[in-house]
Amino acid sequence: MNTLNSTRVLGLLEALHRDAEAADREHVEAMMAKIAASGASIEMLVAELLADESADYRTTYRNRADNFFAVSPDYGRFLYAMARACKATRIVEFGSSMGISTIYLAAALRDNGGGQLVGSELEDGKVARARANLEAAGLADLVQIRPGDALETLKDVGGDVDLLLVDGAFSLYLPVLKLIEPRLKPGAVILGENAFEPGYQSYVRNPANGYVSLALPDEGRGNELSVKLS
């Protein structure tokens, strides 16, 4: 069984990816123009964003409340496949946005026989839209999206975690991982979307911290795959 191939979910995801592309086009084009004009890299732009976030990440992301910053369809299917492969029954998602990645992961939970996804999203408007999208997909019963700061909302995720998706404020990648770390099962999968933050990369790539980790071959998107060994 593959819930992603159902007419209901497939049609919704296609529409959401179109909406995401339209909503984010101006932001992406501006970023690409900046890279072309200055010779900057994506890593350098992330460094600038991290500097902004260090002052107040809440304001930084509130100013981007209308952007999806969604995963690509290919990466969404990858999320689904990873959740199926590790037979996930409890998933934590930092940065649910409008719920596109959440749908891919919740579909895997459905096809694994059930479970729970605990998501966190800073912006109330995005929480409302994500919940509506999950209702439309028929997957809302598997998901709890908690509004607010992930360092508060994810303190108690209700049990041991099979898969963690880290895809929110860059400056919180490592703090969120360390917050969830005590609940990660041996063999748990951790996926860092656009994981350019140096502290996060150094931590998961240091064998002393109990992970095996590698950058995915994803055309410079900076996605990191890690597995908790102990």
Image: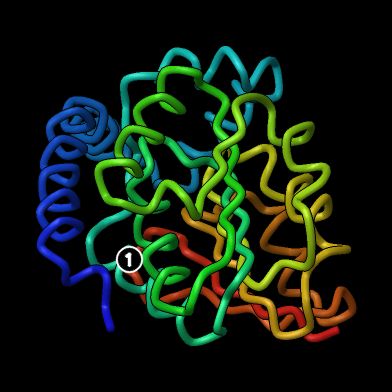
Q: Secondary structure at mark 1?
A: helix
Q: Which residue shows up at 28% across the image and 83% down it? A: 1
On screen, residue 13 versus residue 138, left or right, reads left
Circle 1 is placed at which residue position? 75
Q: Which residue shows up at 34% across the image and 70% down it? A: 218
Position above or below: 134 against 192: above
Residue 195 spot, x, y in % from top left: 55, 55
On screen, residue 87 versus residue 111, left or right, reads right
On screen, residue 200 versus residue 19, left or right, reads right
User: Is any part of residue 146 visible from this angle?
Assistant: yes
Position above or below: 229 against 121: below
Q: Nearer the viewer, residue 106 or 45?
A: 106
Residue 53 spot, x, y in % from top left: 63, 24
In the rendered structure, which amino acid carries the disc numbered 1? Tyr
Q: Which residue shows up at 71% across the image and 67% down it? A: 161
- Image quarter (top left, top right, bottom left or bottom right) of the C terminus: bottom right
Q: Nearer the viewer, residue 185 or 74?
A: 185
User: Is any part of residue 219 visible from this angle?
Assistant: no
Position above or below: 38 against 156: above
Residue 10 spot, x, y in % from top left: 15, 60
